[in-house]
Image (cartoon, rainbow, N blue to C red):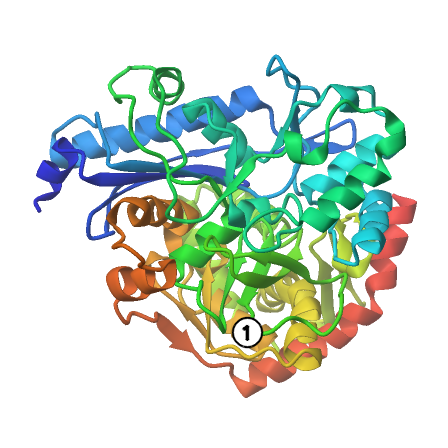
Amino acid sequence: MDAKQAIVEGKTFLGIELGSTRIKSVLIGEDHAPLASGAQEWENRLEDGIWTYHLDEAWAGLRDSYRSLAADVHRRYGTRLSAVGAIGISAMMHGYLVFDKNDKQLAPFRTWRNTTTGEAAAALTGLFQFNIPQRWSIAHLYQAVLNGEPHVGDIAFLTTLSGYVHWKLTGKKVLGVGDASGVFPIAVNDYSPRMLRQFDDLVSDRGFCWKLADILPAVLNAGENAGALVAEGAALLDPSLCLAPGIPCCPPEGDAGTGMAATNSVAIRTGNVSAGTSVFAMVVLEKDLSKLYREIDMVATPAGKPVAMVHCNNCASDLDGWIRIFKETAELTGSGIGKAELYEALYAKALEGERDCGDLLAYNYYSGEPITGLEQGRPLLVRMPDSRFTLANFMRTLLFSALATLKIGMDILTEKEQARLDRILGHGGLFKTKGVGQRFMAAALGAPVAVMESAGEGGAWGIALLAAYMLQKEPGETLESYLAEKVFAGNSGERMDPDPEDVRSFKQFMERYAAGLAIERAAVESL
């Protein structure tokens, strides 16, 4: 079908993802190819020791992102965007958003980036015998209980950012199973009944008027209908009132689930790595892990299959900070180099770095990092007087640092648990510069990494695919089959095998990185 005709007839699918630094909107056709896109940048803030976003900024960003998408549609096709076949909302997983019975927000949004729930996470992990990371919603809730925060007794609804936006657009308090698996442990596509009972017993002496199951969103699988856009929701998204209400919506998902969809990594023995502000690897398991690991989270695909996740709070923020300095320097000297060109040039320069990175060392910890036991972060660059402090070595060190913590967790899966992977797909900002992030990721994981041309579209495209699956699937057709046969149709991306010299280089860096963690800990204690 002609793209303009499809847009006019509403035979398209809209995906919106609220990422860490950007809110992106993507419109796709019935063939799943992107037709138009829009984006708006935003940024978290540290307030009173809490990483947060203001919800009014979320709505402003959503409107601006959608407005830029609608403008792109008009520019490309000469028509207004008034209807789509289905909508999907995605956002950063985890965190803490709570509301009372009158829908009033009870506490500032506490994002995945916070590492203030160590006591609660450890207690719940021991109680459930299931790893509860600090960023999970249930850890935030129990830490608030332990802190004696007065708002806890008034909670009527606890949700994630995607669940919140979906609720305001549709009136439905639901979550896709992938996002729900970062709120509370999942067993057979719903919250674990055993652990729900254990939590209620744990807080039974507190006098709360709620049971945990009563305040959590309902869990839905990929392909299920999650409500429709109501008039108030349509006005929130599109104040011009051009977008019509009544559009069906798929279950809201987290960025991990949409990353799996966007890389065709929902089947057993597939994996993907998302590398941006944070970095995480997802491996769809063919068997359960032999034991509990605090470094590995157990979550789910959008279709409910068990997934081992290695999540690191820090990836490219420190790297981006340095590149902003280079951009400022370029502007000071009158250079007209663009941001994208600068990224490409500096990433490519890293390929010229020495095997030992010139004996430079960096820690990219803007925030705490549970895998290495740090509750706070202090970005550091460390060098000896005789280190070879060149631009190439510097950039290589920064890129290696961005992937170092991920390697610590992935080594548990691949070496201790012997998890088998048929393929690893990379996506996210780190892979935008062709052949650099992909090459170093392959070295870090010691495995081939493929990147698809659609990697830059990311989670917004992934949630649009889930919206399309909801409407276009055949009876009994699984998400795995739909993606493999109708979306990707044999496209497995451009593969890059690990270079043995790069693998040795990364191993050498990791030895220095592990030995120097005491420097990072001392910085946290001293600064």
Where 146 sits versus 59, above or below? below
Compared across the picture, whether 144 is left or right of 78 comes to right
Farthest residue, direction bottom: 500
| Residue at left offset 43%, top offset 40% | 251
Residue at the image position 74 percent from the left and 19 percent from the top: 154
- The residue closer to the viewer here, 497 or 26, is 26
Q: Is residue 63 above or below residue 457?
A: above
Q: Nearer the viewer, residue 115 or 440?
A: 115
**Residue appearing at x 39%, y 50% in the figure:** 462
Q: Residues within 10 Å of mark 1 (few under 14, many from 20)?
A: some
Residue 92 visible within the image? yes
State the SS at label 1. Answer: loop
- Residue 382 falls left or right of residue 219: right
Relative placement, left or right, of 505 versus 351 is right
Total count of labels: 1
Q: Quadrant of the C terminus?
A: top right
Kindly identify which residue carries mark 1. Answer: 286
Given residues 48 and 116, the one toward you in this image is: 116
Q: Position of residue 116 (x, y in %)?
A: 80, 40
Q: Position of residue 66 (x, y in %)?
A: 34, 29
Residue 57 at x, y = what percent?
Answer: 53, 23
Where residue 51 appears, as percent x and y from the top left, is 69, 34
Give the answer, above or below, for where 191 lies relative to 495: above
User: At label 1, which amino acid type do we have?
Assistant: Glu
Q: Is residue 147 visible?
A: no
Q: Quadrant of residue 8?
A: top left
Judged left or right of residue 24, residue 285 is right
